[in-house]
Image (cartoon, rainbow, N blue to C red):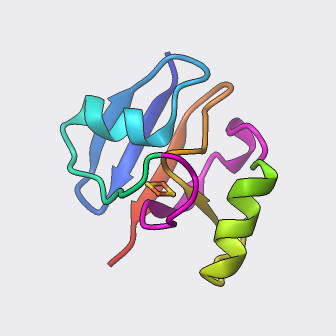
Amino acid sequence: MPRVVILPVELVGEIGAGESLLDAGGNAGVEMEAGCFDCSCGTCAVAVVHGMENLLPPTLDELAVLAAWNRDPARYRLACCARVCQGDVTIRQLD
Ligand code: FES
C-alpha cells in the first residue's frame, strides 16, 4: 500500500491507490487543513517534498486553484484533489 509521510508532524498514513492525500492524513490521525473538500477553495494546499511522480496529474480545476494561490503545481498540490497512483509520497503541511 502507498505510504504518505506528513511533515512536520512526521506521521505516516497508508492509503489505497486512487485515494487522496487528505485521506492519508485522516488515516495517519493528522488534522489536515481543508474547507470545501472539492478542489475549489485551496485551503488544503500542501508542499510535495518527495514522490510527485507517484501522484496522478492535477486536473484543470486543481491547476486553476493552485494558480489563484500562486502555488507552483510542480511543488504544491491540493490534498483533497491529489490522488496517489503508486508508491510513496512525502508532503509538508503549510503554515
Ligand atoms: S479542501 Fe478546498 S480545495 Fe481542498
Q: Which residues are magenta?
A: 38-57
Give me the residue at 57% from left, 59% from top. Answer: 40
* Quadrant housing residue 93: bottom left
Q: Is residue 85 left or right of residue 45?
A: right
Kindly tell me whether residue 74 is visible in this rendering: no
Q: Position of residue 19 (x, y in %)?
A: 52, 26
Whether residue 45 is visible to the viewer of this picture, yes or no, is: yes
Residue nearest the viewer, comparing 94 with 41:
41
Give residue 74's position: percent from left, percent from top: 75, 65
In the image, is residue 93 above or below residue 55? below
Classify 26 as above or below 90: above
User: x, y (%) of residue 1?
Assistant: 49, 15
Residue 30's place in the image compared with 86, above or below, is below
Q: Looking at this view, name the residue that lies furthest to the bottom.
A: 70
The answer to which image quadrant residue 51 occupies is top right
Location of residue 76 (image quadrant): bottom right
Residue 34 drawn in magenta: no
Residue 44 position in % (x across, y down): 43, 60
Quarter in which the C terminus is drawn: bottom left
